[in-house]
Amino acid sequence: MRAAVRLGLSLGLVAAISLLAYLGLCLPPAQASAQGGAEWPQIYLIQPMDGLDRPVHIGHANDGGARLFVVEQSGRIRIIKDGVLLSTPFLDISGRVSCCGERGLLSVAFPPGYASKGYFYVDYTDTAGDTVVARYHLTANPDVADPSSEEIVLTIDQPYSNHNGGQLAFGPDGYLYIGMGDGGSGGDPHNHAQNPNSLLGKLLRIDVETGNPLTYTIPATNPYTQTAGYRREIWALGLRNPWRFSFDRQTGDLYIADVGQSRREEVDFQPAAGAGGENYGWRILEGSLCYNPSSGCVPPVGYSAPVAEYDHSQGCSITGGMVYRGSLDQGMQGIYFYGDYCSGRIWGLKHDGTAWQTALLLDTDLAITTFGEDESGNLYVADYWNGRLYMLAETPPCPDFQSPPDVGIEDIQAIAGHWGLQTGDQGWDARFDRDRDGDVDVVDVARVAAAWGAGCN
């Protein structure tokens, strides 16, 4: 009986929306905050997805399958399909992987044209403690890979258990980029990051696709192919632990979040037109501060200073993110989102045409290990200890658009004024697209009506 009354109330409210929309009752768009002269969106964590074990990387195959691939540190890759976490892992190589701390299965990358190729790449720490980049093939089931199909592309000795890097990503040039930490311990005791004959403390660029090599070849346009004493795989150097880096899918610009030692966390940047060869300073500098020596340091040749940094009162381990290029959250467009594993804070970074601007956008209790995006450009963030993923969006989880304490007639009036709008329309406000399908329609209204009387904390 109560359910019938509630259903009738909801249907009545939905029917009333047409009249309210006709009367023009409307709530002004969400107000962006202004920090440092720039406008920033109000963001929320929505659509939590549970059931993961120590998630450390999120990706997609760009094959039209609308699947999210989530890397679990212990050695499995899981698939989220139509919002459901599949019970069978996409890949399970737990027996090959040394976990955990900063070791483990750390990332997955799908090559351009994956839909027709049926293979992909992973970065993991093997049982000897070394970094392995390997290729795996699918089975006849597109949701299951063959764990016995491994083809090792590259193995790199690791002197210590930390600072493994671990990120793989294909750039817009079709080459595979590999983030390598400085080998670990503390303070880079062997000076790997500045040693041009070491692959540690570097961003590497190799060709694993052209001509289907068994392992890899060196792109002719790598910066040190003709320089004596330099490993030809090196694209950039002077990194401590580039745990997460990403390319802007629209511009091709490269963002690198480099984990600091004890005083600074930094974001480094390379424009898409760059030819490589940047030196990001470690261990001479930590962020913009001298590290070794502690004062009077001289930046290395080719030095590229960070475009953003923060001290350890704000966090202790940066987690790089992505530039938002989705269509639904227009206030987030073009912003690079990044966070901190220790503090749970999430910042935004963008260039205003004159200078880089950054702002704290959300303070959470998450242990942020990674950000990721789906094929549509929606952004996600992972909470390591709770094994949970969230979507990052401008849509609040509770439809109380006006002042709390609960959902009421003001909120019905608010959504009425946006009835029929689609993403890109003038006046579009992502808060009212409750099902995030790109328009405000009866489904969105029904969801607000169903929450009538609910409180929003």
Image (cartoon, grey):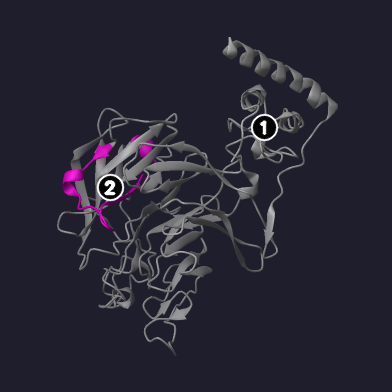
Q: Residues within 10 Å of mark 1 (few under 14, many from 20)?
A: many
Magenta segment, which residues? 91-116
Which residue is label 2 attached to? 212
Pointer 2 or 1: first along the chain: 2
Q: Is residue 219 left or right of residue 413?
A: left
Q: Residue at x 43, y 72 (%)?
A: 278
* Amino acid residing under circle 1: Val
Q: Residue at x 19, y 64 (%)?
A: 157
**Measuring 16% from the left and 45% from the top, which residue is drawn there?**
95
Taking depth in this image into account, of 153 and 146 the one nearest to the observer is 146
The count of marks equals 2
Tell me the CA gap for discs 2 and 1: 58 Å
Which residue is label 1 attached to?
A: 407
Residue at x 39% of width, y 73% of height: 262
Q: Is residue 284 above or below residue 25?
A: below
Q: Position of residue 74 (x, y in %)?
A: 25, 47
Crowding at dot 2, Cα within 10 Å, few <14 / some 14-19 / many 20+, comes out as few
Q: Which mark is residue 173?
A: none
The three-letter code of the residue at mark 2 reads: Asn
Instruction: Judge whether residue 252 can be spotted in this image.
Output: no
* Image quadrant in which the C terminus is located: top right
Q: Please tell me in which quadrant of the rendered image residue 352 appears.
A: bottom right
- Secondary structure of the residue carrying numbered label 1: loop
Instruction: Nearest to the eye among marks 2 and 1: give it.
Output: 1
| Residue 343 located within the stretch drawn in magenta | no
> SS for tag 2?
loop
Quadrant in which residue 341 is drawn: bottom left
CB-based contact (under 8 Å), mark 2 and mark 1:
no
